[in-house]
Image (cartoon, rainbow, N blue to C red):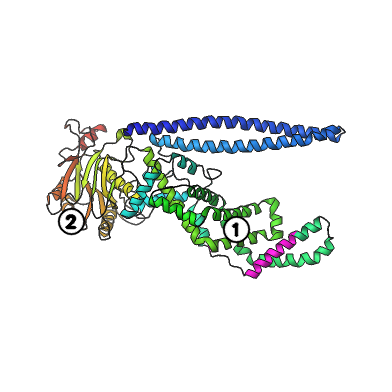
Amino acid sequence: MSASVQDSAVLTDYKSRVQRLQMLIAESRSRKILTLATSLVCAGTFVAALTMALKGVGFLFAVLPILLSVAFWQFRTFSRYSAKLIGSARRSAFYERGIDRIEDNWRGKGSTGMEFAREHHLYQTDLDILGGGSLFELLSTTRSEVGAERLASFLLDPTTVHNARERQDAVKELRDATGLREEVAVLGKYQFHNCHGEHFREWLNQPILRVPRPIQIFLLISSTACSLLGLCGYAKIFPWLQIAPVLAPLLIAQAGIGLALMRRVRVHIRTLLALVSDVGVLRQGIELLGHQEFHSAKLGALVERLRQGRAAVTIRNLERRLIAIERREDVVLYGFSLWLSAGTLLVLSVERWRARHQSDFEDWFDAWAEFEALNALACYSWEHPDHVFPELLEGETTFEANGLGHPLLPRDHCIGNEVALNRSTAFYIVSGSNMAGKSTFLRAVGLNAVLSSAGAPVRASSARTAVFRVCASIAINDSLQEGKSKFLAEVDRLRELINATKRPGPVLFLIDEILGGTNSRDRRIAAEALIGAFVAGRAVGALSTHDLALTEIAENPGLCGRNIYMESDDPDQPLAFDYRVKHGIARQANALAIIRMMGISV
């Protein structure tokens, strides 16, 4: 089956699912309105019948239980349809976003990932990894923030060939699991419920609140005794005068302990209240994942980590404690909670749970984040069937691809090119006209290298590549805050690139207009020295330039470079670009043509 047919099939499937869900939404909405009206009528009839019965129409007392039961049953049905309506709407939204991605209407509708940005990163800005219209925005279909954070790590942090291969196998297995992705998308009661990494880290990094065991036992016994004594007094089993001598010392002792612990307990309660919905989403996700059967090594290991520790059951116990703390904050229950020292007891209960399970919880938390990131890459693969999984090479410094395209370009505007960077061709010098596509070509190479390391497919008809440490100097700007000119900022980036070649693993360098802030002669000498250092460090890459003097560097047989260019094939139409790479050196210039386009006579 061709890629275009597969793509059409995915789009048709998504639209069919949306249509079915919209019908279900309409049906649920109608039934919700009907059951609400019925429950209100029954409630009104109940009130009227009760009034008449109290006025002497005795036989209506027999009808009252029936009316009340029907009203209660209808209200429960109303709640069920409300939940079904919300769930169907969220499922529909999941597929609608997928349709937007397939039809290239996704920009500005997803997460930019800028909260995960790394300061002074070697390529995140240059390759549009994060930000509006970025690779992250296209890929980010995770349900929770912790999954999104792990996805950003896949795209920004270096990895090994072994890890990349394991990710790739996992993505291949998850690729067809559309139903599983749908279930992940509707985790949690509401869409705004999330799973925030900073909330969990704040809680896990807090010192455990340790209280001597005798005090904990006393609080539990005292709370139980106060509850029983209060009930006995309220029910008039014993008079309050007899209860007070026993109850008062207990309450005073509880109050003393509560005041001593109040400041620390309040800090913990604030932290725990932020975790309630987060833990709910995490627990549901782990429970869903624990029921899956996978064959790939990475996914199988993730599921086994969750099953061995009975993660879903254990986190469910934590969730119950957190829900109790949340309910304690209700106005109606707050007074009773003070009477029973419920807040202190619940916090201490959570702290005992954390003391027993903190390391396990961190492991489960990590497993869920890893799965979510892999699942997002699988969704990308499913929605882009024309992309291929590259062969990942070990022990080689190679990036080779046929039909390589920029992953963020619309399909109708994306031109594929052949790339072969290896020992025999260590670097390209890309010359050509303005707007001919040189920077886009560099970004296409870099973005597909990043996708390969993440375990995702690349936009190519075939590809084989090492797992690179990518370094780019494409979107370097001056910095008033740091007091750096653009030239100095670029020099700093090139220094970091050279340092990267001294660390283990192959390096891919991508440089746009190298050392553009200096004269042609110095630029030529400095650029050749830099390229020599890159090649000596077993790096491969590409440089773009308008300065044709730099093309001489590729003629140095000791550097193993090659000249390629991008320009219009028609000298009379210098702006009629085909965006295809050609071997050799550019001979055309289009600056004057661009000036004339602006209406300026030259």
Q: Is residue 505 left or right of residue 71?
A: left
Residues in magenta, as a range: 206-227
Label 2: state its secondary structure: helix
Front position in the image: 463 or 563: 463
The quarter of the picture where residue 244 lies is bottom right
Q: Is residue 28 left or right of residue 108?
A: right
Q: Is residue 478 left or right of residue 530?
A: right
- Quarter that holds the N terminus: top left
Q: Position of residue 132 (x, y in %)?
A: 39, 43
- Where does label 2 land, which residue? 532
Residue 115 visible? The answer is no
Residue 581 visible? The answer is yes
Mark linked to residue 86 = none
Q: Earlier in the sequence, mark 2 or mark 1?
A: 1
Q: Position of residue 312 (x, y in %)?
A: 53, 52
The quarter of the picture where residue 353 lies is bottom right
Disc 2 crowd, CA 10 A, few/some/many (<14, 14-19, 20+): some
Callout 1 amino acid: Ile
Q: Is residue 201 left or right of residue 458?
A: right
- Quarter that holds the C terminus: top left
Mark linked to residue 269 = 1
Q: Position of residue 556 (x, y in %)?
A: 12, 52
Q: Position of residue 415 (x, y in %)?
A: 26, 36
How far is the residue under mark 2 from the one under mark 1? 60 Å
Q: Which residue appears at 18% of the width and 46% of the height?
A: 547
